[in-house]
Image: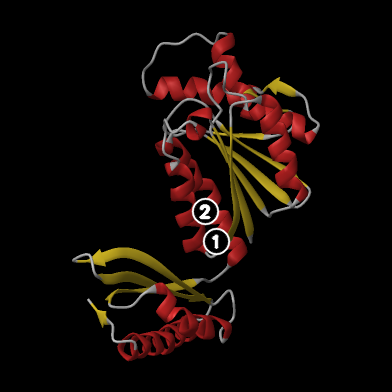
């Protein structure tokens, strides 16, 4: 299952806000066994949004997730941009209006369904609104060809609630049984360049989707001894095979670290 993420928000491009949504989503998608192929970040600009959505859809991922731009302010343009990309009109959806009313009622907030709030209920024609269990603006689901599109909120707690309830189950259903196991080695005395040939040989001898090996430099101990973290991830549908692969590769890496004069801390 191929997934793309499109994050909308000028604040993400100016350094004002850390893109924690993309980081969180990437972790959840990987744990479920789907493949996140791309994360795109764009500004709150209607032309940029519609163009980016079209570009994503040309690649035809199974799932496209957008975050941000669903609120009531002038710069919340995601749904309008998606509508343009899909060649649809935007319209006030009665179900979305009721969802917004329920959200305010749930929090005992007085409200008037004025044009500002109705903006949050203006969605691409024919799309499906999804109740926001945390905030006010509904999420939206649509389809284009083989791609399912979920437009999620930018507020992390709202985005995560919708993802956990509506998207994660769909990913798991399509991926099926999936197992992932991981080992990390914190080493001293070995550099990335020293261990790279052995890791390349290991990676090439295993299926691409079954094994992930990555080195992470960690600076120098007492300014002289190199430190790296070696991350080893085994994954697949057969738990015994995943475990066997992890153990076999771990043994080779441990032996190579020792041969190079390094230590596992």
> Where's residue 42, x and y in %?
60, 35
Residue 59 placement (x, y as % from top left)? 74, 52
Residue at figure coordinates x 59%, y 9% from the top left:
115
Outermost residue, right side: 87
Find the residue positioned furthest to the front. 224
Q: Is residue 95 visible?
A: yes
Would you call the spot at circle 1 few (<14 residues within 10 Å), some (14-19), or many (20 or more)?
Answer: some
Q: Secondary structure at mark 2?
A: helix
At 41% across and 73% down in the image, what residue appears?
192
Is disc 1 in contact with disc 2, using a CB cutoff of under 8 Å? yes
Give the residue number, with chain letter if any, for mark 1. Answer: 172
CA–CA distance in space, label 1 to label 2: 6 Å
Q: Is residue 39 left or right of residue 240?
A: right
Q: Residue shown at 69%/54% (left/top)?
A: 61
> x and y percent of residue 143 in the render?
72, 43
Q: Is residue 180 left or right of residue 35?
A: left
Q: How is the image coloured?
A: secondary structure
The image's mark for residue 168 is 2
């Amino acid at each position: 299952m191929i997934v793309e993420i499109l994050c909308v928000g000028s604040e993400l491009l100016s350094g004002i806000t850390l893109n924690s949504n993309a980081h969180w989503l990437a972790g959840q998608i990987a744990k479920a066994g789907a493949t996140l192929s791309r994360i795109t970040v764009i500004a709150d600009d209607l032309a940029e949004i519609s163009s980016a959505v079209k570009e994503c859809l040309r690649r035809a991922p199974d799932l496209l997730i957008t975050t941000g731009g669903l609120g009531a302010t002038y710069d919340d343009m995601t749904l309008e941009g998606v509508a343009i990309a899909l060649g649809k009109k935007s319209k006030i959806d009665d179900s979305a209006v009721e969802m917004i009313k329920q959200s305010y009622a749930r929090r005992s907030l007085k409200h008037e369904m004025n044009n500002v709030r109705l903006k949050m209920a203006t969605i691409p024609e024919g799309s499906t609104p999804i109740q926001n269990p945390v905030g006010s603006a509904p999420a939206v689901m649509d389809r284009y060809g083989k791609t399912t599109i979920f437009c999620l909120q930018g507020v992390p707690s709202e985005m995560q609630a919708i993802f956990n309830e509506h998207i994660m189950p769909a990913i798991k259903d399509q991926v099926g049984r999936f197992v992932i196991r991981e080992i990390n080695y914190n080493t001293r005395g070995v550099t990335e360049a020293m261990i790279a040939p052995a890791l390349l040989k290991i990676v090439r001898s295993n299926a691409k989707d079954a094994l992930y090996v990555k080195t992470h430099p960690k600076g120098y101990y007492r300014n002289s001894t190199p430190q790296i973290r070696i991350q080893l991830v085994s994954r697949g549908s057969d738990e015994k095979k995943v475990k066997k692969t992890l153990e076999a590769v771990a043994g080779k890496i441990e032996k190579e670290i020792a041969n190079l004069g390094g230590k596992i801390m």
